[in-house]
Amino acid sequence: MLTRRGFRDVLGCFGTGVVLVTAESGGGPVGMAVNSFTSVSLDPPLIAFCAALTSTTWPSIRATGGFAVSILSDAQEEVCRTFSARGTDRFAGRDWARTPAGRPVTADGLGWLDCRIRTVQVEGDHELVIAEAVDWSTGADARPLIFHSGRYASLSERTHAK
């Protein structure tokens, strides 16, 4: 029998990177952790992610018309956990940089993208967000934070076969 739990378990076999999606709203900075992030197109430069319909953060980000994406390193698991929790000041006690558009990004991430929302479409229990990257930069030279089978992980060092 096919179940929701079984579907989730199968999807958990696919390792994903983890990013923060942040914006500057009228009430201050807002942000959330996302592991459904992907590239869509190089020309134009498009990305996508999914936001749960139950998210209390996404509506504030969506209302700004744009957001920044911080690509997290494996040293930033605690940041990701904070941005996944409800009812906490996600921006307190950390160093933040700003994109040229003024959106907050982690000061020590692997890179960032500054994006303008192009389309938002409801699909199942999520909104599918497609956005155009209008600015970007690479950052720290480190390994990415990975989410796999319900846990955080990191890539091992690469070895080259001889």
Image (spheres, rainbow, N blue to C red):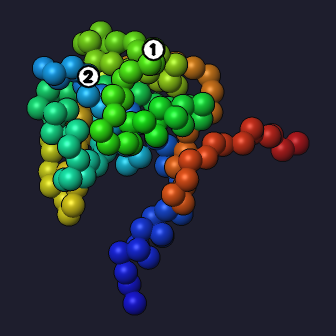
Residue at the extreme right of the image, as rendered: 162
Check residue 29 in the rendering and tell me which mark sits there, or answer none.
2
- Residue 74 vs 111, above or below: the answer is below
- Residue 88 vs 93, above or below: the answer is below
Q: Residue at (38%, 36%) from the top-left corner?
A: 83
Check residue 120 in the rendering and tell me which mark sits there, or answer none.
none
Q: Quadrant of the C terminus?
A: top right
Q: Residues within 10 Å of mark 1 (few under 14, many from 20)?
A: few
Q: What amino acid is at disc 1?
A: Asp
Q: What amino acid is at disc 2?
A: Pro
Q: CA distance from mark 2 to mark 1?
A: 13 Å
- Pointer 1 residue: 95
Residue 99 in the figure: left or right of residue 148: left
Residue 68 placement (x, y as % from top left): 31, 25
Q: Residues within 10 Å of mark 2 (few under 14, many from 20)?
A: some
- Residue 6 visible within the image: yes
Residue 161 placement (x, y as % from top left): 84, 44
Residue 146 placement (x, y as % from top left): 55, 45
Residue 13 placement (x, y as % from top left): 53, 63
Which residue is at the front of the view, 15 or 136? 15
